Amino acid sequence: MSILINKNSKIIVQGITGSEGSFHTEQMIDYGTNIVAGVTPGKGGQIVFDNIPVFDTVKEAKNATDANASIIFVPPRFAANAIIESANEKINTIVCISEGIPVRDMIKAKEIIDKNKLNLVGPNCPGIITVDECKLGIMPGFIAKKGSVGVISKSGTLTYEAIDQLVKNNLGQTTALGIGGDPIIGTDMKKALKLFEDDKETKGIVLIGEIGGTMEIEAALWAKDNSTKPIVGFIAGQTAPPGRRMGHAGAIISGGDETALAKMKIMSECGIHVCESPSDIGIKMKEII
Amino acid sequence: MKIHEYQAKSILKKYNIPIQDGYTLNNIQDAKETILKVKNDFSTDDFVVKAQIHAGGRGKGGGVKYSPDFDTAYENAKNILGMNLVTPQTGERGKLVNTIYITEAFNIKKEYYVAITLDRERKKDVFMVSTEGGVNIEEVAKNTPEKITKIWIEPLENLSNEDAEKLADSLKFDKELKNQSKEIFINLYKCYKEMDCTILEVNPLIKSDNDKIIALDAKLNFDSNALFRHEDILSMRDLSEEDSMEIEANKFNLNYIKLDGNVGCMVNGAGLAMATMDIIKLTGGEPANFLDVGGAANADTIKNGFKIILKDKNVKAVLINIFGGIVRCDRVANGVVEAVNELGLKVPVVVRLEGTNAIKAKDILSKSNVKIIPANDLKDAAKKVVKEVIK
C-alpha cells in the first residue's frame, strides 16, 4: 500500500525531450518507475530511452498507452496549460515540477482539476516517491528506505533532510510527498493527511510546513478530530522577517496566523508533536511511533 | 514586484478609475513649474505633496502634506524631496525620498477602503470593502471585522454586476454613488486580473464634497512569475528601492535576503535554508542572511554565493549546508575549494554535505589544503558555526 502512485502506475512525462525532462526521466526509469510515454508538441513519432514513444498531445499518449499518471517538466509559462491538458484527459494523478507558474494561471488549472476530481501534486515541488515502487519526481531515490512513515512537506531539500533523519533512526517510509511552496497548489496538507490516514501501511506521519498561508493550521484542525496516527510536525521560518518572500512564492508572512510560532502553537494544541529544531524530526518520530 | 503610487495610479487611469491626479519630480528646481502645471491641468488651487517610496504609512512619517496654496506646496516639496522618511513600515533606517508626487486636492466627505487579493484558503480572489477607510485596515480587521465586507470571485469569472452592487450597498451608497462605484469596482477587478496583481489596494477611496468617488491612493503589487507578459510593468521597477546585494544575487540566480545577524549561510532549497537559519538561532547564534543557491548549484554558484555573503561585514562565520539530490556534493565541494582559494578565507567556514556523492565530497575537502570545518549533520553544523562566532 502507498498513496497516489505504486508499481502499477502508468506514467506519461510531459516535456520529456527537454533537458530537465529527459534527465529526470532517466532517473525515474532507473528507480523502476513505469514510464509508458512522453509528450512534447511537435516531436510526436520519436522514440526515446530505447522504447518510450513520444506523442504531440496527452490525448494521443493516453489513447495509445492507457496511462493514469503524468509528470510535468515544461517551462513555467506553459505549465498550467500542460496541467489542464492532462486534466481534460482525466489523468488521475498529475505531478507538476515546474517552478514559477503565474498565480492567475494556477487558479484556472486548479479549478479544472477540482471539477474533474483529479489529484494534482505541486507545482514547484519535488514530486512523490513510493519507496521501492515508483518515483514521480526529482527526489534522490537512494536516500529513502521502505517502511511505515509517510512524509508530507512543502519543501524539497527539507524533505530529503527528514527522510535522511528517519533512515538514520531506522525508520523507513511508505510514500514521501513534496506538495510545493506556491500560493496555489493541487494537494494541500489536509488532503495529504487524509490520504495517509486511509493507507493501512502508514503508521506515522511527518508534516513539514513553513511560514505563509494557513494550510498547516487547517491540516492540524482536521487531524485533531480525524487522525488516528501520530504526527510529527516542523515549521520552517521561525527566524524569517515578516513581509519578505523567503524563496518560495508562498513563503511570506502577511498576517499573524502565518508566522511559524502561531502555526506551531496551534499544531501542538491539536495533538501534533511539534519539533522546535529541524534536527529533531527523526528522533521525535522514533520516540513516539 | 512593487511599484510607486503614481505608477499604480497611471495604470488605474487606463482602467477608467477616477484618480487624484498629478505630476512627479525628482529635482527641486522643477518644483515651481510642476506645481503650476498641476494647478492649470487639474484646475486646482490647493495641492498634496506626496513622497514616493515603496512603504506604507507615509503620512505618519511626514511624507504626505496637504498644501492650501502654491507657496506652501513649494515649501513642502523642498522639505519632503530628499528627506529620510521613517514610517512604521520602513524600519528605523527609513528610506530616502528620491521622487515626490504633486497632486490636486479634494475636500473629503468620507473615506472608504477597497482591496483585492488572493484568498489562499479558498483559492479564489477576495474583494474587500469597508466604510473605515484611511486608517490601518489590519486594526479594523482585528477589532471590528464586521465592518469589512468580503466577496469571493469564482476562478474563471469576473466581478459580476450583482456582486458589485452588494459591495456598493455595504458602503451605504445612494443610487448615483452606487452607479459610479459599481463601474469602479468592476474595473478594479478587471485591472487586478489582467495585470496579474497579487494585491490591489485603494486606501482611501473617497467621496468628495461634490459626490464624486475618487481613488486618493493606490497600491499595486504584481506576481513576479507573470512579469514575462507585462513588459510595461517591468519597466516601472525602481532598483533604488531594493537592496543592492539582493539585486546582485539575483543576477547569479541566487535568492538572497539580508538579515541582521553574523552567521552567514548558504543552503540549497528555500525550506532547508529557512530551517538552517532556525537551527542557528536555536543554537544561540543569529543568521546574517537567507541564501538559497537553488537546485542547480555548481562550483560557480558556490563561489558567487561566497562573494555575496562575505560582502556583509557583519559576517563572522559561514555555514554551508547542502543536501544533494540533483545537486552533486562533489561538485559543491570543488566549488568550495575553488572559492576559498580564490577569495581567501577571512572567516571560519563550516561545511555540511549530505546526499548524492557526499562521501566523494568529504574526500575532496579533506584532501584539499583549505581549512574548513567539516560537520556530520545539521545539529553538529549549527553547533560548530555558533561556537566559531562566540569564540
Image (cartoon, coloured by chain):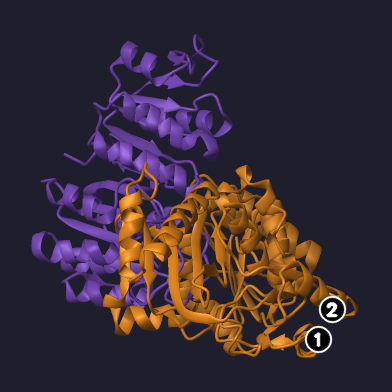
Chain colours: A purple, B orange
At a point 22% along the width and 57% down the height, the residue shown is A205
Q: Residue furthest top?
A: A45
At a point 38% along the width and 83% down the height, the residue shown is B139
Dot 1: few (<14), some (14–19), or many (≥20) neighbours within 10 Å?
A: some
Residue A26, position as x, y percentages in the image:
47, 28
Quadrant of residue A84 within the rendered picture: top left
Question: The N terminus of chain B appears in which quarter of the rendering?
Answer: bottom right
At a point 74% along the width and 80% down the height, the residue shown is B97
User: Given the image, on which type of amino acid does mark 1 rest?
Assistant: Tyr
Q: Is residue B56 left or right of residue B129?
A: right
Q: Give the labeled residue for mark 2.
A: B31
Q: Give the labeled residue for mark 1.
A: B74
Residue A98, position as x, y percentages in the image:
48, 41
Quadrant of residue B71 within the rendered picture: bottom right
Residue B74, position as x, y percentages in the image:
81, 86
- The answer to the question of whether label 2 and label 1 lie on touching residues, with beta carbons closer than 8 A, is yes
